[in-house]
Image (tube, coloured by chain):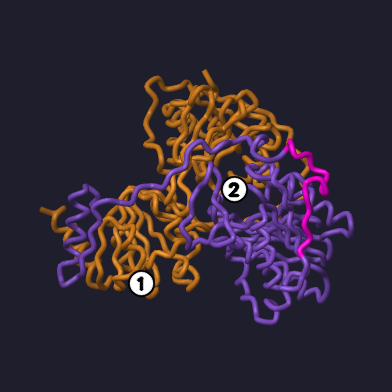
Chain colours: A orange, B purple
Amino acid sequence: MSTVAVLVESRDGSVTQPTFEALTLARTLGTPVAVWIGAAPAPAEAARLGIHGAEEVRVVDAGDAARLPAAAAAALGAATADADVVLVISTFVNKEIVTRLALATGAGVVVDASDAEMVDGHVETLQTVFAATWNVRTRIATDKAIVGIRPNTTQASPGETPGAATLVEVAADLPETRELVTGVEPVPAPDGVPLAEAPVVVSGGRGTNGDYTLVRELAELLGGAVGASRDATDEGWISHEHMVGQTGTTVTPALYVACGISGAVHHRGGMQASGTIVAVNIDPDAPIFEIADFGVVGDLGDVIPQAIARIKEVRGS
Amino acid sequence: MRILVTVKFVPDLQSQRSFTDGAVTRTGDDGTMNELDENAVEAALQLREAAGEGEVYALTVGGDDAVAAVRKALQLGVDHALHVADASVAGSDVFGTAKVLAAAVRKVHDEAPLDLVITGMAALDGLTSMLPTALAAELDWSQLTLASGLTIDGATATVVRNLPDAHETVSAPLPAVVSVTDEANTPRYPNFKLIMAARSKPVTTWTLEDLGVDAATVGAAAARTVVVDASPRPPRENRTVVTDTGEGGAALADFLIERGLA
C-alpha cells in the first residue's frame, strides 16, 4: 500500500476544507498521512485530520523560515521521505514549494489537477487547460509523484476507518537561504468562505459600475463568496483577492453567477470549469453567454433584485 | 544593469488552441509571445531606463517558430535576442526546460555578469508557474518570485509578494531570478520606430551543443510526466439565454431553484 502524504493548509490554526478534500482523494491512492508545517496543531484539528483518514500527523516546526519556498520544501521533504505520493493544494506558493521538492527528490509533478488515480502502479492526473476548454490526462512516470490538486474537485468525506492521527514530530535540516523576508502584512481573512473554496461564487464586473451591493446580497443569499473580474479590481472597486481569472484565483464552484462580466478569455480561464454557470449582462453579444447554462440579457439593477425577491419568496412559502 | 528576460512562444489566447501528439500545438500562424512575459520585458526595460545604462536580453527555447517570441521582445525595446533552437528540446518538462534556460543564462553570464533574470508569473498555455522556481534552483541564484513590485538598491533586490494570506516583502542579493505578476506594471506597446528597428536586429541561435547540455537529459525521453490523452471538452448542452422584459430575474431564480442551487 502506497504512503500518500498530504500537506495541510490551515487558516488561524484551523484546517481548511481543501485539505479534507485532498485527504479524501489520498484515501483512494493509498494510506494517507498529514504533514503539518508549523507549531503543533491543536488536538481537535489533529483529530479532524484523523477523521478524514490521516494515520499520522507529521509536524515539522520550521518557524518563520517556512515562508521561503526552499525552506518549506526542505521541511516537506523531511516529512515525506517515505511517501510514494505527495499531495498539496494547488496554490501559487505550493507550486513553488513542490518545484523545489521535485528537484531535490527527482519526483515528477503535475499541478492544477482536478483528479488523480493509480493506473498500473503510476499516478495519472486529470487537468483542464486552455481556459478549461480541453481535458488532459497525464501520467507521472517517476516512482515518486507530486500532485497539486485544485480545491472543490473532490467531495470531502470522513474515512470509513478513521485514522488514529498519531502526532509525530519530524526534525528538518533547513537550508541556508539567500532570501530574507523583511515584512509580512497579514491580509484579513475574508468574511465567510474563501473564494477558492466556495461552493457558490457570485462575481461582479464592469457592469456593476463599482457598486457591489447587489452582488454581495446575492452571494450572501446563496451562501457564496464574492468574486470580481480584472476590470473591477483594476478600477479599485474591490480588492485583488477577489479577482477570478488565470492570474488571480481559479474557482470551480457548483454554481458561478457572473454579473455584468463580459467574459474575456482571462476571466473564463479562471471559472469555466464551474458546475453551473449563470450570467446577467446588458450586452447580448457578451462572450460569457457562450459558456453560460442560463443567461439573462438585461440590467443588473432590474434582474438581480427580482431574482433575490423570488428566491426569498419561494424559500418563505 | 544587465538583465535577461525569458519569454515563451505560446498559441494566441484568442486562437483555437489544441494539442498534437500530447504537446501544445505551436505554429507561427497563431503563436505569439506569452502575454504575461510582457510584464517581465516591461520590468527589465524600466530598470534599464532608470539606471540610464545597461543591456536587456530576451531568451526563448523552442522550434523555429519560437523566434517570434524574441522578435516581439525586440519590438518592445530589448537589446539582444537569443533563441535556443534544437529538436532535442521538444517534449521537455519544466525541469528540462529550466536546465536548457539555465545553460543559456550561464553562457551570457560568463561573458559579462548578469544582475537579474526576469520572467513572467506563468505561461498562459500551461500556467504551471513552476519554471521561475526551477530556473532559480538550477542557477543557484536568489529566488524572488511572484513580485508585484521590484526595486533594486545596490546589490540587493527587494520584491513585494501579494499572497492570499499576507503581503510579503522579500530581499535577496543579486544575481536573482525574479518573476513578476501582471500587477507589477503596465506593458508598453511597440512603437513604429522600434518595430522597424527590430526587423534588422539579429537573433543569436544556439543549439544544445553550443550550451554544453547533454541532449539525453532533456526532451521527451527525460520528461518525468507524459500526456497520455488530450481532448476538447464538450460544449455545455441545453444552454438558455433570455432577454429581460420584466421577468428575467424571476426566470433566473426559477432556473436556480429547479437545479437545487438556490
Q: Residues within 10 Å of mark 2 (few under 14, many from 20)?
A: some
Identify the image quadrant of residue A147. Answer: top right
Which residue is found at the position 81% from the left and 60% from the top? B115
Which residue is found at the position 72% from the left and 48% from the top? B86
Q: Is residue A169 above or below residue A68?
A: above
Is residue A201 left or right of A308 when viewed as pictured? Answer: right
Query: Label 1 lies in what chain?
Result: A
Please name the residue that numbered disc 2 is placed on. A93
The residue stretch that appears in magenta: B203-217
Task: Tell which of B43 and A265 is nearer to you.
Answer: A265
Estimate the spatial distance between the alpha carbons at disc 2 and disc 1, rounded to whole Å: 31 Å
Q: Is residue A286 above or below residue B61?
A: below
Task: Tell which of B174 and B196 is nearer to you.
Answer: B196
* Image position, residue A152 (x, y; %): 40, 43
* Image position, residue A65 (x, y; %): 69, 44
Please name the residue that numbered disc 1 is placed on. A208
* Image position, residue B153 (x, y; %): 80, 66
Question: In the rendered structure, which amino acid carries the disc numbered 1?
Answer: Thr
Q: Residues within 10 Å of mark 1 (few under 14, many from 20)?
A: many
Identify the image quadrant of residue B5. Answer: bottom right
Residues at marks 2 and 1, common chain? yes
Question: In the rendered structure, which amino acid carries the disc numbered 2?
Answer: Val
